Image (spheres, grey):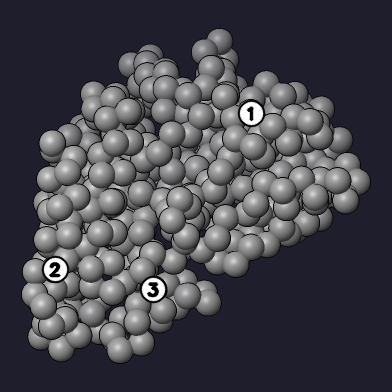
Amino acid sequence: MQEFLPPRRLLLGPGPSTVHPRVLSAMSTPLLGHLDPAFLAVMNDIQTLLRQVFATTNRFTIAISGTGSAGMEASIVNLVEPGDTVIVGVNGVFGTRLATVVERCGGKAIRVAAPWGHIIEPEAIEAALQRSGPVKAVALVHAETSTGAWQPIEPVGKLCRTHNTLFIVDAVTSLGGVPVEVDRCGIDVCYSGTQKCLSCPPGLSPFTLSDRALSVIKHRRTPCQSWYLDMALIADYWTERNRAYHHTAPISMLYALREALRLVEEEGLPARYTRHQLNSDALVAGLMALGLTPLPPAGHRLPMLTCVTVPVHIDEAAVRAQLLETFGIEIGGGLGPLKGNVWRVGLMGESCTETNVLTLLNALEEIGIRSGWISSPGVALQAAARTYNRSHH
Ligand SMILES: *Cc1c(COP(=O)(O)O)cnc(C)c1O
């Protein structure tokens, strides 16, 4: 068997995103023991940097070993005990997954649904809070990667305070791409993933808990059903005075995350958010010039994930295959009910550049001209260029 050399790809799908060479090189540095003081300093740095991106002062801010779904599972399994009720916003794949996890923990999920591509209206959450008895938590997906919808968080945070319930937010795709303001929005549990807008390989889940959530965990009636994701145990490793062994930290992944977060800090969060919005505006202008309309209504569209409806005269799977084979570009197709109907273009972290937007639009125009569904070449690139020109003046 030969060494595996991956083909060259431009990652413009729903994740993983492009990883900066500095992050790749951090991963290849020598290992340390996971209790080595030099490694514990790496963990401290990660906690400090994560608090900045989460905009929180939460002491309990760590990276869980596992992908974004591990953060989701950890949120639910630590807070929800059998019989507890959780209101879950369901408007895509990830809200659906959250509700499933609640039920697997023996909880009762009250699904507040909205059509895919739309947000969950805060009024609908309020109505559910008023109708239901005591509710342990409300759980929402900030950036629904399956549809491109950008969920308003702040009004729901206020509702959770009024109704004295915990607020769980999935920020897997949003963290590092749009503001995730844990403290200001009253979020009690927030989890993310490394391979979306943080541009690190998949494998860790940034995770933060408010003191209120910590106290709920401390006063559980039953032990957390997951040993591996039991935050009461993991806290002992991430807390400076304890550092007790729980499981072996994924050392190289933590090196990678530290470097990825350093890159985020160097760019600065405001500049990073502006970059994501500008490139997304240019991409949407280009795609709309090709007759591809974003699924979510204007005002609720995520910058880092653009989900467009593909007209029936375009063979969407064939175009994606050509993008990959001919141009080395990966974009995503639809999931669940959107399968075959949409494209999902990710402009996440390092993948979010003007060059990449123009490269993708150019490739789509080439394919469209060859297949006959584009008659006037250049319209997409021109539309994108107009957006960039406006912003440069
Ligand atoms: C990607 C994603 C997840 C799951 O993360 P994995 O790293 O695939 O486990 C959860 N929620 C949202 C919104 C996501 O985009």
Q: How crowded is mark 3: few (under 14 residues within 10 Å), some or many (20 or more)?
A: some
Q: Do callouts 3 and 2 mark residues in contact (Cβ within 8 Å)? A: no
Q: Name the residue under label 3.
A: 309
At which x and y percent is residue 175? 42, 39
Q: Which of marks 1 and 3 is nearer the N terminus?
A: 1
Secondary structure of the residue carrying numbered label 1: loop
Secondary structure of the residue carrying numbered label 2: helix
At which x and y percent is residue 365? 13, 73
Q: Residues within 10 Å of mark 2 (few under 14, many from 20)?
A: many
Q: Do callouts 1 and 3 mark residues in contact (Cβ within 8 Å)? A: no
Q: How crowded is mark 1: few (under 14 residues within 10 Å), some or many (20 or more)?
A: many
- Outermost residue on the right side: it is 133
Q: How many marks are shown on the rendered structure?
A: 3
Q: Is residue 293 left or right of residue 278?
A: right
Of labels 2 and 1, the one closer to you: 2
Q: Disc 2 versus disc 1: distance between alpha carbons?
A: 44 Å
Report the front residue among 290 and 167: 290
Q: Mark 2 is on which residue type? A: Val
Q: Which residue is drawn at 23% across and 24% down?
A: 266
Report the front residue among 195 and 163: 163
Q: Mark 1 is on which residue type? A: Gly
Q: Mark 2 points at which residue?
A: 379
Q: Disc 1 versus disc 3: distance between alpha carbons?
A: 34 Å
**Quadrant location of residue 6?**
bottom left
Of labels 3 and 2, the one closer to you: 2
At which x and y percent is residue 136? 80, 41
Q: Earlier in the sequence, mark 2 or mark 1?
A: 1
At which x and y percent is residue 82? 84, 49
Residue 374 vs 119, above or below: the answer is below
Q: Mark 3 is on which residue type? A: Thr
Q: Mark 1 points at which residue?
A: 186
